[in-house]
Image (spheres, rainbow, N blue to C red):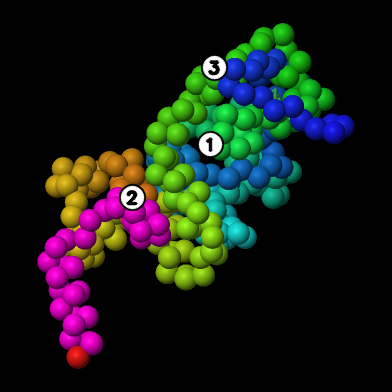
């Protein structure tokens, strides 16, 4: 088919180098929809020294995914200044070390869950694609720090790609709220875990409990397990025996 973009694998090579000498430098940091993953939100707001709530309010908009009914979070562009990213400066990205997944991946994009990539743009817009430097896709992904996302968000991917979650649009606002909290609003999720009956209900390794008090990454991964348990019915978490016994007793009383 004419104009169809070639599909690359991690073994493929492509020409690319991005640097301030290019006429397009920072042009790609405006008028673009950047979806933020849970790990993106964690890294960016820590970099900025903000609470999760402050970061989400100030820098993001959240929408409900049409197919899933679950929330997705986008970086809020500056509508009054050509929809530019709030973090772009003439010298480049202000939060470069903690820039989002989508910015690390650009100009590549993943076109499936398998080893398939495409180039999102063309040399007329992204001059870096005309540079002589030739890169292996796999080396590029490594240099951009993308593999760590696969480790951190493995359970999140299992959850969001689960046939059970994909089969039916989530309509329960309580599930939507819990999903948003555990994935993106970690300060609120921490209060929920430690200030509710949560830890009376679930068996959680005491060392994990201790780490979750201060370690956001531990808390995020625990949140993924909790969502996976609740939405996919996995065995990622275990309910305490006494809670199960109590539930059985109450069920027996109701049946009369
Ligand atoms: S358009 Fe391409 S080369 Fe230009 S700044 Fe963006 S990524 Fe770099
Ligand atoms: S976060 Fe950084 S790299 Fe991404 S669009 Fe904004 S300025 Fe550009």
Residue sitting farthest toward the bottom: 256
Callout in the foreground (2, 1): 2
Please report whichever mark, 1 or 3, sits nearer to the chain's N-terminal start: 1
Q: Is residue 244 magenta?
A: yes
At 71% from the left and 19% from the top, the residue drawn is 128
Q: Is mark 1 within 8 Å of ligand 2?
A: yes
At 39% from the left and 44% from the top, the residue drawn is 155
At 29% from the left and 53% from the top, the residue drawn is 235
Callout in the foreground (1, 3): 3
- For the residues bearing labels 2 and 1, Cβ distance under 8 angstroms: no
Residue sitting farthest toward the right: 2
At 17% from the left and 47% from the top, the residue drawn is 205
Residue placed under numbered mark 2 in the picture: 225
Q: Position of residue 180 (x, y in %)?
A: 45, 57
Q: Is residue 22 magenta?
A: no
Q: Quadrant of ligand 1?
A: top right
Query: Is any part of residue 246 visible from this angle?
Result: yes
| Left or right: 192 in relation to 109 | left
Residue placed under numbered mark 3 in the picture: 139
Label of residue 100 in the image: 1
Residue stretch in magenta: 227-255
């Amino acid at each position: 088919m004419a104009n169809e973009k070639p599909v690359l694998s991690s073994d493929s090579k492509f020409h690319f180098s991005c640097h301030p000498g290019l006429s397009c430098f920072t042009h790609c940091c405006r008028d673009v929809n950047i979806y933020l993953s849970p790990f993106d939100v964690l890294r960016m707001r820590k970099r900025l020294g903000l609470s999760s709530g402050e970061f989400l309010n100030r820098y993001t908009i959240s929408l409900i995914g049409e197919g899933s009914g679950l929330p997705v979070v986008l970086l809020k562009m500056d509508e009054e200044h050509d929809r530019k990213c709030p973090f772009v400066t003439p010298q480049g990205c202000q939060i470069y070390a903690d820039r989002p997944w989508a910015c690390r991946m650009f100009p590549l994009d993943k076109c499936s869950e398998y080893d398939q990539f495409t180039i999102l743009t063309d040399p007329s817009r992204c001059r870096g694609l005309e540079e002589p430097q030739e890169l292996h896709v796999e080396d590029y992904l490594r240099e951009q720090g993308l593999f760590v996302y696969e480790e951190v968000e493995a359970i999140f991917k299992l959850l969001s790609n689960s046939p059970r979650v994909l089969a039916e649009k989530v309509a329960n606002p309580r599930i939507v709220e819990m999903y948003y909290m555990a994935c993106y609003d970690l300060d609120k999720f921490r209060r929920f875990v430690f200030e509710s009956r949560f830890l009376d209900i679930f068996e959680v390794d005491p060392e994990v409990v201790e780490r979750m008090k201060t370690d956001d990454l531990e808390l995020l991964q625990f949140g993924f397990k909790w969502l996976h348990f609740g939405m996919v019915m996995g065995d990622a978490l275990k309910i305490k025996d006494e809670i199960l016994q109590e539930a059985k007793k109450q069920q027996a009383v109701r049946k009369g």
